[in-house]
Image (cartoon, rainbow, N blue to C red):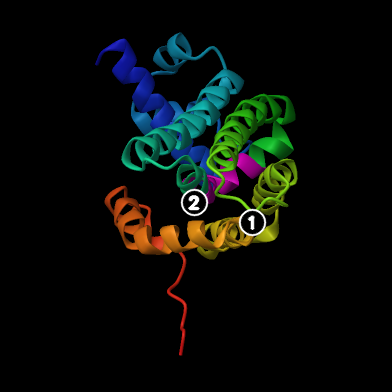
Amino acid sequence: MGTEDNKEKIVETALQLFNTRGCKGVTMDDIATSMHISKRTLYETFANKEELLSECLMRVHDEIESLHHQIFHKVDEPLLVAMYMIRANAIVNHSYHHLIEDSERCYPEIHNRFFKIHSESFRTYIHHGIEYVRQHNYLRPDADIEVAEEFICNLVQQRRMSDVADSREYARYTSEICFTYMRGLMTVDTIARYEKEEAHFRKILEDLGIGDISPRKRNNK
């Protein structure tokens, strides 16, 4: 097994163990045993558990970034990229909620380093999406884009840390709140344009494997 392949397998195994048993509940011995490799091989790749945990958290960040880029290349509409990115972000946070929560409690310095990188990236996507619609006059004249950016970023962060974050409904609820909020800031023409193309964008989400949490169809009866 090559060095990179070996590293990849170690990170995948550690991610699974950390997420199911908690950061404190997993030792380097556990990881080596689970992989059927020697401790020496493990320590040749990662000097200690803290270094391995850092790599695992960065892998979570990279997974979210990968989804963001896939959406960006599929959807030629920055606001929708930003909104759908919230769904992708929520899905990954749901999948790794216990790991993220446990690392914050047990290894705050490592967690904060990861979260700073992740939150800065998240805010950049939201900022670009909102700035795009402002420049194209998609928002009502009285819409405050700075407030909108703060609301969305703070909402996602607060809900990520709440008791509902490990619920499957969390992802859909969070993204739907953000969609509803942004809809209230849009012009009538922009809303009509979005509704006309909604089926197309939902299909894109489904193709990317994240369509299961798109907003439920409203009952207009």
Say whether residue 47 is visible: yes
State the predominant SS element of the stretch in magenta: helix
Q: What quarter of the picture does the N terminus occupy?
A: top left
Name the residue at 68% across, 59% down: 163
Tag 1, which secondary structure? helix
The answer to whether residue 99 is above or below residue 114 is below
The answer to whether residue 13 is above or below residue 83 is above
Residue at mark 2: 87
Q: Position of residue 124 (x, y in %)?
A: 59, 31
Of residues 47 and 34, the one drawn nearer to the viewer in this rendering: 47
Q: Position of residue 40 (x, y in %)?
A: 43, 12
The answer to whether residue 55 is above or below residue 159 is above
> What's drawn in magenta, residue-wise?
86-101
Of residues 73 and 86, the one drawn nearer to the viewer in this rendering: 73
Of residues 177 and 59, the one drawn nearer to the viewer in this rendering: 177
User: Of marks 2 and 1, which one's residue comes earlier in the chain?
Assistant: 2
**Residue 208 colored magenta?**
no
Q: Amino acid at mark 1?
A: Leu
Q: Disc 2, disc 1: CB below 8 Å? A: no
Q: Position of residue 151 (x, y in %)?
A: 72, 49
Q: Position of residue 146 (x, y in %)?
A: 73, 40
Name the residue at 53% across, 65% down: 169
**Residue 97 colored magenta?**
yes
| Crowding near the residue tagged with mark 1, few <14, some 14–19, many ≥20 C-alpha atoms within 10 Å | some
Tag 2, which secondary structure? helix
Residue at mark 1: 185
> Image check: 125 left or right of 184?
left
> Image check: 215 left or right of 174?
left
